[in-house]
Image (cartoon, rainbow, N blue to C red):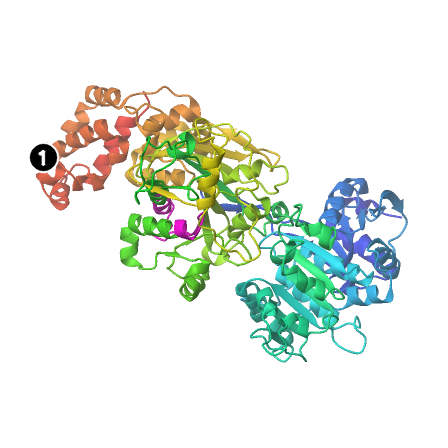
Amino acid sequence: MATDDAYGMNEDETCRTYILPALDRSGWTTDQIRPQFQINGGRLTPTPKRHMRDDPLVADYVLEYTPDLPIGVIEAKRYRIDAQDGVEQVRRYAKKLRLPFAYATNGREIIELDLRGASPSIREIDRFPTPEELWSRFLDAEQADSALGRELLTTPNNHSLRNSDNTIKRPRYYQRIAVNRTLAAIARGQERILLVLATGTGKTMVALQTVAKLYNSQWTPGRKPRVLYLSDRNMLVDNPKDEYFLKAFGVDDVTKLGGGKVVKGRKVYFALYQSLEQRDQVEDKPLYERYERDYFDLIIVDECHRGSARDDSQWRRILDHFSPATQIGLTATPISRKDADSVDYFGDPVYTYSLADGIGDGFLAPYRVRRVRLNVDVEGYVPEPGQRDKYDNEIPEGVYGPRDYERVMVILERTEAAAQYVIDYLRSTAEDGKHGKTIVFCENNNHAGRMRNALYNAASQEVNKHSDYVVRITDADRDVGMAHLDEFRKDDSDEPVIAVTSKLLNTGIDLPAVRNIVLFRRIASMPEFKQTIGRGTRLCPEIGKASFDIIDFVEATRLFDDPNFDGPPLRVVRDTADEQGHVIDTVGETPDGQEIDPETVAEPDSAYEQQDGGAFDSASQAGVIDDPDEIDRIRARGRKYVVDGVEVYKWGESRYQLDSDGRTMRLVSIRQWVRGRVLELDLAPASLRSQWASAKSRGALMSILKKADVDAEELPDAFDVPDVDPVDLLLNVAWGLPLVSREERFNRFLHEHQEFLKSFQPQAREVLEEMLLKFVEHGSTQLKPETLQVQPFTKMGSVLELTGRFSGDGLPLHAAIDELGRRLLEAS
């Protein structure tokens, strides 16, 4: 019976006095009880100042049958707290850890949550189950209650891999779940297994630990299993081979097939579909047919949504040949089409870890979206009757729109305007002078080449310092492109900064340092869209990357509105640019549904061939060619028309931010957006006004606002009040203070602060009077010493000479300018 002292115990004392002894009485050893089990890292949330990380999810105790094999979770409460208060909390932990058993206890009561099957229950029990009791129930829940199931699940993980600090690289909680679910499926004889894990969440670690457990078990009695790791790109097999499997199993057990040579006697084989198709000149057989059908026990199909996914794929024949093997499909984006269905082939996923899960857990980078509309994309392009393109081809009349660009119609200025926008954006978001690594996705190789050229020309000052600042990396660039890719992948390399591609970099490659994804190719396929934006989801703490940005020129991010998409962006921005690609306007627009033609941008085919031609499809436009013969002629010819001299400029900009549910996006106007960012500064109006008056603190505030996509200098034009100072606009938007023109502030200053001016010597006063005129003409952002380097000050003398005018008993120059600003901007 508890004493009164028990009711005064804190949680730790309750655990030591009551909960741990209760576990001990049920036979749980210290090694089986994991205290303060950290489940995730805590969600990352970008702020104007820095990235904030939410508190991680931590369970009081996790019960492990063997190391790294959780079978139950406990939420402990103080002795005096009702155990019922821990039920929802521990249910959350159990759901996250995919555990069928959870317990809430205060030392007096134990409440068990049995979450198995269709009839879950919550009931009070008088003791914890023993390890063997819970283990038996766990095996039943996992449908792995067999000798093989027990062996596979209890086989230890491989601990050969090391982190950068030489600590053991252990699987994360969801990776352990994926491995255990896979092993349980194998134990019950399932021959086709599908795992869905978001890009950047470590599918290779799951594959390694699965193979390691099978390797150290009696799954294949009397010998080690033979494993084939299969994909369609060298980078997709070389990285797991070199960075994971060779380190875990050694060179004697790991090999890569190629050159048409049959290699046997190894345990883990890596191969490309293409390599397995190579024919032997003697037997005239593809390499895969020279292996017995049952040679491999396990086949891991990486990026299984591609390559062999289609029913009629040539590469599917490889999987069919090795059909006796257990086959595991790994993907972030299972596909479901008439001719290709991941689930139809592999079955329902045994485990899914989504992009939303990864962002919520803090293992993946959240992202922002900036939607940029160019005028020719919104209005369409209409050639003159009889107009000819650059190569003297007569252009068929009609309205050409986004579906036609780069397939049928090439507008050179469209690419140049987009390139200028990207360069301006990188310059405005540079940190310590370094631009964020950026991938630009284009429609095809030719488009990527022209975009590379346009970016190169727009970034002349950067190219002068780093000749490889911008490069093209496509399948057509071969060894040179791969060399650029090797450098681009490094988080500490200064070049390349921009990689321009078509499809080559949209899947299956780790690029943790990428901060910007630019979409200049239309994407209608959800799997392709997820794979593409997945290039930015990896965290890179080495360079402080905890989020990334998506710049969308082609409305591809409309797929965020699809209910099948998981993991919405933090916000969306819509810009308007002039023909040079410079931002001229920022507006809000309600997203409307976009009908996407799946035939326009299809799922990448197995060979990833770049298509330079394209179908002419403008049926939804008014005034287009409607003669079927003419349309067929154009389609059959596959001709593209190249024009220049077209005025192209940025049309609009929209911003979205996450609503309180953490999933859906809410449209905000430019006024709402600016108001939110100003209030995040956590300053009162007087404090904002005071800090704005000082050149140094004003620069810091402007920098913070700019990182939050608020350019203070552009606000007067954005709000159509060019005669109002930025700080007055900020005060008006955030707190509703009245707008005051710069002319009004100037006149009031002359009326109220003549004595301040007269306190300076005539030569110093001349400088301040010219600074006042600069304020009237350009605003408070000119109230800084750097302004002395432009006319008319340069005619008065050097900066040193002008500074000398303020020597003596009066305020020094810098202080005088700040005081001038304070008096100009004080409350009306």
Left or right position of 753 against 676: left
In the image shown, does 781 or 624 lie closer to the viewer? 624
The three-letter code of the residue at mark 1 reads Gln
Left or right position of 631 against 3: left
Q: Position of residue 536 (x, y in %)?
A: 51, 51
**Residue at left 37%, top 59%?**
495
Check residue 429 for magenta coloring: yes
Which residue is labeled 1 in the image? 763
Check residue 785 for magenta coloring: no
- Label 1 crowd (10 A; few <14 / some 14-19 / many >=20): few
Q: Is residue 356 visible?
A: yes
Tag 1's secondary structure? helix
Q: Is residue 167 visible?
A: no
Q: Position of residue 77 (x, y in %)?
A: 76, 46
> Which region of the structure is painted magenta?
421-448
In the image shown, does 473 or 140 lie closer to the viewer? 473
**Residue at left 45%, top 40%?**
633
Q: Position of residue 374 (x, y in %)?
A: 39, 35
